[in-house]
Image (spheres, rainbow, N blue to C red):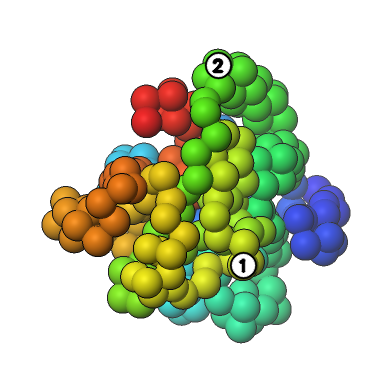
Amino acid sequence: MNLEFLDQMNRKVQIDFPPKRIVSLVPSQTELLFDLGLSKQLVGITKFCIHPEEVYRSKRRVGGTKTISLDVVKELQPDLIIANKEENQQEQIEELMQLYPVWISDISTFTEAMEMISLLGSITDKQSASLLLRQEIDLAWSKLKPRKKERIIYLIWQDPIMVAGLETFIDNILHLAGFQNLIKQTRYPEMTLDDLQSLAPDRLFLSSEPYPFKEKHLKAFQRQLPHTKVQLVDGELFSWYGSRLKCVPPYLNSL
């Protein structure tokens, strides 16, 4: 039957409920759909949807998150496409909207991520599974240990240097973890090495994604910032806003 749902852009989306052929254009939400028990319904993913491995190996890939092959999507004949405001390219999504129901998430906080889990459960007829997952995430976050407030900068790119600023999901996770983000610009501003040295953070986090920072980068930044603790961190645990959220508190406690 045809039902109407609101997405996180406050758009009305007509869905043939429950959907039987889903294309996911968002890595963290692909993993979430699998964990909600929707592996059979998931027919298409992006090349960046690497978790879980069995989905990555077995499902048709429709290109990158910003380089979607519309022809491949058409071949898959989806009755629902899951997209994201930030991770996907607006013009491509608007083109897909002309052909298929497209449900779009818009997430910059933990609260919005938890809302998205419930909403995806509703539109896929997996309400019980999404409720259970939310309870598991809440339990994990109840065990987050308080920490001394440390001044921090989180790098997402190397050349040019780009950092996570305000109004990002990463910033919200840093705040919940007890860190003070020194970046006061919004989104992902560019910075220079001189900027980093002037701010003199207690810690400098080098993320594993989207830029794959390695040990050589850590050593180079450590030489330039001798009084800062420079660390490589798992970018997925700071930026993936699906079922992986239940893995975040133990990781934060270990840092």
Q: Residue at x 19, y 57 (%)?
A: 223
Q: Quadrant of residue 131?
A: top right
Q: Residue at x 47, y 48 (%)?
A: 152
Q: Identify whether 136 is placed above or below 25.
A: above
Residue farthest left in this picture: 216
Provide the residue designation for mark 1: 185
Quarter of the image containing the C terminus? top left
Q: Position of residue 28 (x, y in %)?
A: 49, 48
Q: Position of residue 211 (x, y in %)?
A: 32, 63
**Quick one: 216 or 138, which is closer to the camera?**
216
Q: Local crowd at mark 1 within 10 Å, few (<14), some, or many (≥20)?
A: few
Numbered disc 1: secondary structure: loop
Q: Quadrant of residue 210?
A: bottom left
Say left or right for 37 vs 9. left
Q: Which mark is residue 143?
A: 2
Q: What is the tally of numbered marks visible in this picture?
A: 2
Whether the residues at callouts 2 and 1 have beta carbons within 8 Å, the answer is no
Calculate the distance from the C-alpha at mark 2 to the C-alpha at mark 1.
31 Å
**Quick one: 48 or 39, which is closer to the camera?**
48
Q: Identify whether 83 is placed above or below 215.
A: below
Going from N to C along the chain, the mark reached first, 2 or 1, is 2
Q: Residue at x 46, y 60 (%)?
A: 199
Q: Position of residue 243 (x, y in %)?
A: 53, 35
Q: Tell me which amino acid carries mark 1.
A: Gln
**Quick one: 60 or 219, which is closer to the camera?**
219
- Judged by depth in the image, the label closer to the viewer, 2 or 1, is 1
Q: Position of residue 206 (x, y in %)?
A: 33, 53
